[in-house]
Image (cartoon, rainbow, N blue to C red):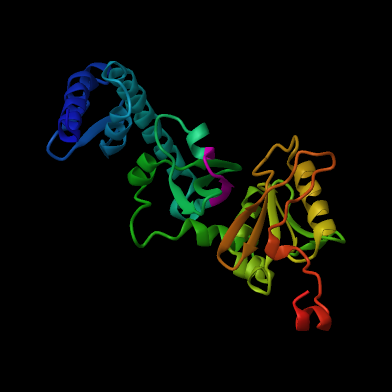
Amino acid sequence: MTPTDHHAAILDVLSELAPIWLPGTTVDREQRTVEVGWGRGASQMSAVVDVSEIVERCQQLPRRLWPEQIEAWLLAVVAEGELATEEHRYGDVAERQRTLLVQRGWSARTAGPVADVLLPFGDYFEVVVFIRTGAQLRRLTVVRRSMLGLGDPDVPSPVQLTLAEITGLTAVDAGNFSFLRRAGDPLISMALVDRETMLPAASIGAGLLVGVPRLSTVGYCPADAGQERADELARWIAQTYRDAPDQCSPDLFWLQGDQLVHVPVTLASPPTAILPGALKPQPRRTWLRHLFGR
């Protein structure tokens, strides 16, 4: 079966079963959309949703699992519509967008039937978009973003809205390393995204060794500060990550300009950072060695 045939077969299943599971639901095969409704009594609302996401999910599964996957997706879309309706009661949704820097794969491991709104950020992290509703941060999904009109060009950038809240943060000097922290504030992880403002030393010389053990904490030291300071930072990151309610990543990285390189840490006790050769002190060559190649 070709991808086009697969697509058509999935739409067949969706068109047949959607009105049974959710009466009143209609599928537009030409536009490849589905219209779903929600609400109670006289307060009824509906939204037209693109079906690309559920088609892509089904294409990765055996045909016998399509109905179960489609049903879960449709119910999740309705729940997203109800949530979007509620979020409007708290004011301008666009201005309440926020982002968190999380370990890559976090969304895939924890998301439900509807995909989160993700922004790419290198090989080790991803940026996930949230909506601040009261005291709660709610993950923004692709479906709800469309329902709320947050994909329009004139909508404020969730990244810029987030960075505006943390740019005034002052680093704490812990002796051999420094850290940025604001208790209970998961937005601090985004300091790695705004490295030019929050971590300007990353663009100077060898850059920085950096870690994001918690969403509320970023630790760092000069990348060429030596083995002892690198090991102390690695131990602090591991300890800070352990049992934290807002865990991000237990790893250590070398940040230089726009380049982020993973720095392995041994499982020994205490752990040791395995620095790349470029960050290890080089023995000075004497004039005799220089002249005679010894």
The image quadrant that residue 223 belongs to is bottom right
Q: Observer-nearest residue: 53 or 151?
A: 53
Picture mark count: 0
- Which residues fall within the magenta stretch? 99-106
Figure check: 151 above or below 271: below
Quadrant for the N terminus in the image? top left
Residue 40 appears anywhere in the view = no
Name the residue rendered at 21%, 20% in the picture.
Answer: 19
Residue drawn at (36%, 62%) of the image: 154
- Residue 268: image x %, image y %? 80, 39
Left or right: where 37 falls relative to 131: left
Q: Is residue 42 magenta?
A: no
Which residue in the rendered view is the most extreme toward the front? 292
Q: Which residue is situated farthest in the right direction here?
A: 175
Image quarter for residue 197? bottom right
Q: Quadrant of the C terminus?
A: bottom right
User: Where does the image place residue 112, in percent across and percent down from the top left?
Assistant: 45, 30
| Residue 147 position in % (x across, y down) | 33, 43
187 is higher (above) or lower (below) than 293:
above
Residue at image coords 73%, 38%: 244
Question: Is residue 291 visible to us here?
Answer: yes
Residue that appears at 26% across and 19% down: 63
Q: Which image quadrant for residue 104?
A: top right
Check the image and report above or below for 270 versus 164. Answer: above
Q: Is residue 107 left or right of residue 143?
A: right
The picture places residue 263, in percent across and down from the top left corner, at 67, 52
Residue situated in front as seen by the camera: 240 or 95: 240
Q: Is 105 contained in the magenta span? A: yes
Judged by its main secondary structure, the magenta piece is strand
